[in-house]
Amino acid sequence: MLRPKQVKFRKQRKGRIRGTENRSVHLTVGTYGLKALESGRLTARQIEATRRAITRKMKRRGRVWVRVFPAIPITSKPVEVRMGKGKGNVDYWVCPVRQGKILYEIGGISPEIALQALQAGAAKLPLLTKVIF
């Protein structure tokens, strides 16, 4: 599972995901990509499940680049614990994704297989996505 090796602070506040992405909006290393059409949060499990689905459809040919990394900790309190007594422990890690960000890139395969692989990966994500060439 993806998570940072070290963080400056163990627990963070939730924050908001506003606006559109302006940095990673173009393909850099691959030929085909999966682009987010809406904002949201991707968990480490969702990122890994998508990567596995894409790799499986490609039958391990070509190359996959993951352009997102979960670096925000999400905390939760145990079940049936009363209010108060501080913030809960870190439960999982997420990556905030803004609209327009490239999530995955693939290369070295035919367009038909690339389209099938990225559609299989998109099915694992909670966001609306688009395959780009």
Image (tube, rainbow, N blue to C red):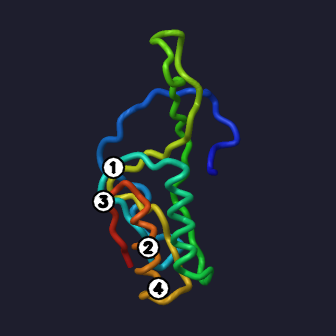
Identified by mark 2, the residue type is: Leu
Q: How many labels does the image show?
A: 4
Q: How far apart are marks 4 and 3 (CA)?
A: 22 Å
Mark 4, residue position: 113
Q: Is residue 28 left or right of residue 7?
A: left
Identified by mark 3, the residue type is: Leu
Which quadrant holds the C terminus? Answer: bottom left
Q: Position of residue 24 (x, y in %)?
A: 44, 59
Mark 1, residue position: 39
Q: Position of residue 100 (x, y in %)?
A: 34, 58
Q: Are marks 1 and 3 in contact (CB under 8 Å)?
A: no
Bin the neighbour count of mark 1 within 10 Å (Cα to Cα): few under 14, some 14-19, many 20 and up. some
Q: Which of 23 and 3 is in front in this view?
A: 3
Q: If you read the primary sequence from the N terminus, does the residue marked by circle 4 or circle 3 appear first?
A: 3
Q: Where is residue 103 in the image (x, y as percent from the top left)?
A: 45, 61
Identified by mark 4, the residue type is: Ile
Task: Mark 1 vs mark 4: give the one in front.
Answer: 4
Mark 3, residue position: 37
Q: Which residue is drawn at 56% across and 34% down?
A: 91
Task: Mark 3 vs mark 2: give the one in front.
Answer: 2
In the image, which disc is placed on residue 118? 2
Q: Residue at x 44, y 61 (%)?
A: 124
Q: Which residue is drawn at 36% across and 73% down?
A: 131
Q: Which residue is drawn at 40% across and 66% down?
A: 122
Identified by mark 1, the residue type is: Ser
Q: If you read the primary sequence from the N terminus, does the residue marked by circle 3 or circle 2 appear first?
A: 3
Q: Distance between the residues labelled 1 and 3?
A: 7 Å
Above or below residue 6? Residue 78 is above
SS at mark 3 in the image: loop
